[in-house]
Image (cartoon, rainbow, N blue to C red):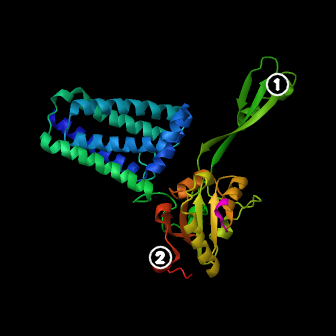
Amino acid sequence: MRILITICRYFIGILFIISGLIKANDPVGFSYKLKEYFDVFGWTFFSPMALSLSVFITVFEIACGVATLISYRMRLVTWLLMLMIVFFTFLTFYSAYFNKVTDCGCFGDALHLTPWQSFGKDLVLFVFILPLFILRNRIPGMLSEKISHPLMLLATLLSLWFNIYCINHLPVIDFRPYKIGTDIKKARAIPPGAPQDVFESRVVYLNKKTGEKKEFTAQELGKASYLWEDTATWKWDTTINKLISEGYKPPIHDFTISNPDGNDITDSILSTPGFTFLLVAYDINKSDKEVQPMINALVASCDKARIPFVGLSASTSGMVDKFRHENQSMFPYYFVDETALKTMIRSNPGLILLDQGVVKAMWHYNDFPDAEEISKSYGVKF
């Protein structure tokens, strides 16, 4: 029994710490996933608190992992673990069964799980937590309170600090598809011969007398001669294309840059020779305004050196024009899907340096460099 308890403790403790650290590395990204869940369940009143809840959940997860590893107050901790796993098992089952959230976000961008994989993961966790819960009164503490109390406090404070650091800068380890070194052109491309999406077309006919609807595959339709022989009863209603198997999906599949006229200019931006600066502001109204003078100074240096500098936003043209006027932003803005911009960089605004479509560097608005710093670090000649 002791061996079983030890295995369960170490498995749960280590997994919770790893999962918590991955989410703490990107709390802004985890907050986006929480908002997605809130939308699915109609809990939109939680959306303004998504980032705070993201931090709380990751700190709580890491603290529970550390507590389980050192057998700290296991009566309380096992109750917390059981309540948490029951809640998330229900959540992932609902999401999987109704296909509501395609990725649970349990391990951030480091590991993507399908809804059913996520549900299966929670079932495994439940199996390991259950013995700890049943035998919670028989699990002794490993350390004295003089050591365990400060250790738990230290783990909690360090995880909180790590969250705050990553919010005010960028993820320490970048698992996103736009990370430094990525050739966006190649990451968007579909290799020759890659598997394509396979669809099955189903034709729906309506019984005009009873209101009944029947679906037919192409093969079944060829045998159902009564449908066109009895047109007084049956009529075509609709055609449904059902996805049977998903083909190859490139790492970057939702990134398209459009100009104000709606024309796709993605290739021209990514193929521009030399360096290009992208200022990413998914929501122009939430874009930090204090950094705008620094941006304008960098734009002036880029203009002198004829280095392209463009803004990317998901806001409307009217909002962008108003913002540009208020902040004297003398560079063009183009338009990209909001989800893609949020994925590109966890900062609003965020600055990305491209070298003919390859990501060379990126900065949170708290870390924006000036032209001299960029020139010294990346060889950009202003």
From the image, state whether disc 2 or disc 1 is nearer to you: 2
Q: Earlier in the sequence, mark 2 or mark 1?
A: 1
Which residue is label 2 attached to?
373
Is 10 colored magenta in this rendering?
no
Q: Are marks 2 and 1 in contact (CB under 8 Å)?
A: no
Cα distance between the residues tagged 2 and 1 = 73 Å
Q: Which mark is residue 234?
A: 1
Q: Residue at x 42, y 57 (%)?
A: 171
On the picture, is 317 further left or further right than 305? Answer: right
Identify the element where label 2 is drawn.
Answer: helix
Residue 117: horizontal and vertical position, in percent? Answer: 44, 41
| Helix, strand or loop for the magenta stretch, by majority | loop
- Where residue 270 sits, quadrant-wise, is bottom right
* Amino acid at pointer 2: Glu
Q: What stretch of residues is rendered in magenta? A: 326-330
* Amino acid at pointer 1: Trp
On the picture, is 6 further left or further right than 274? Answer: left
Between residues 42 and 289, which one lies in front from this camera angle? 289
Residue 155: horizontal and vertical position, in percent? Answer: 26, 48
- Where residue 213 sits, quadrant-wise, is top right
Say few, some or many: other residues with alpha carbon within 10 Å of mark 1 (under 14 / 14 to 19 / 20 or more).
Answer: many
Identify the element where label 1 is drawn.
Answer: strand
